[in-house]
């Protein structure tokens, strides 16, 4: 099968940039796809970070310290950008205006104003694919829930809970980093870092929160500065958002939680949906299992636990008896992005990466959550435009 090669530049050569390089190296894991990424250029202000790509990724032709040089490279068709949140607006806008396809890290801007600037640049530059990174809905169990929602199995929605929990900041001795500072991470704190992952499926399903009451927590108030002293932690560690959402004219409660301090949860993403006719839940804590409860009046109410085999959005060489993991979800997300770049509306399967509109929706929710935290009130969310 002849494959369309998409030449990528990587801006930000840290952890997630390396994860993309690993996904590109594993492309042979995918079956029956007519597209593939090739990383041809990289850029990082830290030369050592870019050097890792030069040494480890044989397709890299150029390494830059100035991202504008990468954008001027004629051998770059698309860009993956993974930089701190305060750099999203200037760099994403320049990528879009350069006519490059973009997969960018969440939250697509440090705040609502920055997000609007990115959307404005996109509106002024049609014809490119711009998406946000969100890999967890590509787990087979999550994809099963997507299919059940599409089949309208649930009846009237009773309630929804979605979350993304870490324990990565539980250690108070962990040194301060950019995610703990408002200048680089923004006021959203853990919401900006984790929240689009949580909202991706609810927004895709059309479940827009109409209001939010937020409980935001700063649990570790100071951290080591790496020089023998301590400095304040300025951002929120945990967030619990109680929302009123709506589906087909019926309102229901939806709880969204984002936690960087959740003991016992190394990297847990989950969604639970309760309905009058069907309920279901999936968590990456038990990635091989998806639970459902079909309900009929008078019948027994019993949860059914079934294996979620390695049945992914894009066919792979791995058989269904094996487990699906985080690196697999990243590979599937990248396949969806490359598929859309290569084939547009004729992509091989219908589930797209998180859209700029969904990222903008998350900003509306987070901005309202900050106001709710300041006032102690429930705040309405305007979805008028």
Image (tube, helix red, strand yellow):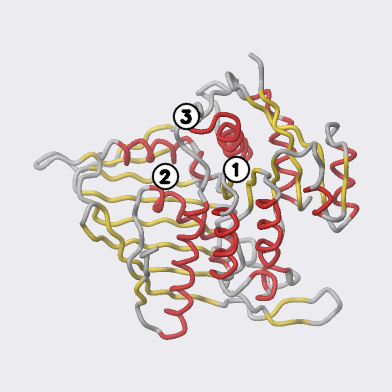
Q: Residue 56: percent from the left, percent from the top?
A: 85, 37
| Residue with the mark numbered 3 | 349
> Of residues 9 and 278, which is closer to you in this image?
9
Estimate the x, y position of residue 354 in percent, counting from the top left: 51, 48
Q: Earlier in the sequence, mark 2 or mark 3?
A: 2
Residue 200's place in the image compared with 380, above or below, is above
Question: Would you call the spot at circle 2 few (<14 residues within 10 Å), some (14-19), or many (20 or more)?
Answer: many
Pointer 2 or 1: first along the chain = 1
* Image quadrant in which the N terminus is located: top right
Is 329 placed left or right of 204 in the picture?
right
Q: Give me the residue at 65% from left, 76% from top.
A: 182
Density class for disc 1 (Cα within 10 Å; few <14, some 14-19, many ≥20) is: some
Asked where in the image residue 210 lies, by quadrant, the reply is bottom left
The correct choice, above or below, for 366 with respect to 143 in the image is below
Mark 1: which secondary structure? loop
Coordinates of residue 134 in the picture (x, y in percent): 55, 48
Mark 2 or 1, closer to the camera: 1
Q: Which element type, helix, strand or loop, lies under badge 3?
A: loop
Tag 2's secondary structure? Answer: strand
* Left or right: 269 as drawn, with respect to 338: left
Q: Nearer the viewer, mark 3 or mark 1?
A: 1
In the rendered view, tell whether residue 61 sits above or below residue 109: above
Task: Work out how far the residue at label 2 is from the one at label 3, CA to CA, in angstroms.
Answer: 21 Å
Return the disc, 3 or 1, that comes first in the chain's sequence: 1
The residue wearing badge 1 is: 128
Number of labels in the image equals: 3
Q: Are there few (<14), some (14-19), or many (20+) residues within 10 Å of tag 3? A: few
Task: Give residue 174's quadrant in the image.
Answer: bottom right
């Amino acid at each position: 099968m002849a494959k369309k090669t998409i030449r990528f530049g990587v801006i930000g050569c840290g952890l997630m940039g390396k994860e993309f390089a690993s996904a590109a190296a594993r492309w042979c894991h995918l079956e029956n796809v007519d597209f593939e990424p090739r990383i041809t250029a990289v850029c990082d202000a830290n030369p050592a970070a870019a050097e890792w790509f030069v040494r480890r990724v044989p397709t890299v032709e150029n390494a830059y310290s100035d991202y504008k040089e990468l954008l001027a490279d004629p051998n770059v068709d698309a860009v993956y950008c993974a930089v701190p949140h305060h750099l999203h607006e200037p760099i994403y806008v320049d990528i879009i205006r350069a006519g490059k396809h973009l997969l960018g890290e969440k939250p697509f801007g440090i705040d609502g104003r920055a997000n609007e600037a990115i959307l404005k640049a996109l509106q002024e530059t049609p014809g490119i694919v711009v998406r946000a990174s969100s890999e967890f809905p590509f787990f087979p169990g999550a994809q099963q829930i997507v299919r059940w929602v599409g089949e309208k199995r649930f009846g009237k929605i009773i309630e929804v809970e979605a979350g993304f929990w870490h324990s990565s900041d539980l250690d108070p001795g962990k040194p301060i980093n950019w995610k703990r500072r408002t200048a680089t991470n923004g006021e959203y704190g853990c919401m900006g870092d984790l929240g689009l992952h949580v909202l991706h499926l609810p927004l895709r399903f059309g479940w827009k929160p109409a209001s939010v009451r937020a409980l935001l927590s700063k649990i570790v108030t100071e951290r080591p500065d790496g020089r023998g002293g301590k400095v304040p932690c300025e951002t929120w560690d945990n967030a619990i958002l109680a929302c009123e959402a709506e589906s087909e004219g019926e309102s229901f409660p939806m709880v969204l939680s984002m936690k960087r301090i959740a003991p016992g949860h190394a990297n847990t993403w989950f969604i639970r949906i309760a309905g009058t006719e069907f309920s279901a839940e999936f968590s990456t804590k038990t990635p091989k299992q998806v639970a459902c409860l079909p309900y009929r009046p008078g019948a027994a109410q019993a949860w059914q636990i079934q294996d979620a085999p390695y049945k992914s959005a894009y066919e792979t060489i791995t058989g269904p008896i094996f487990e699906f993991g985080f690196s697999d979800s990243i590979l599937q997300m990248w396949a969806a992005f490359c598929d859309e770049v290569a084939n547009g509306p004729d992509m091989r399967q219908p589930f797209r990466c998180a859209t700029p509109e969904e990222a903008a929706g998350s900003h509306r929710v987070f901005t309202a959550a900050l106001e709710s935290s300041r006032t102690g009130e429930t705040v309405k969310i305007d979805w008028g435009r």
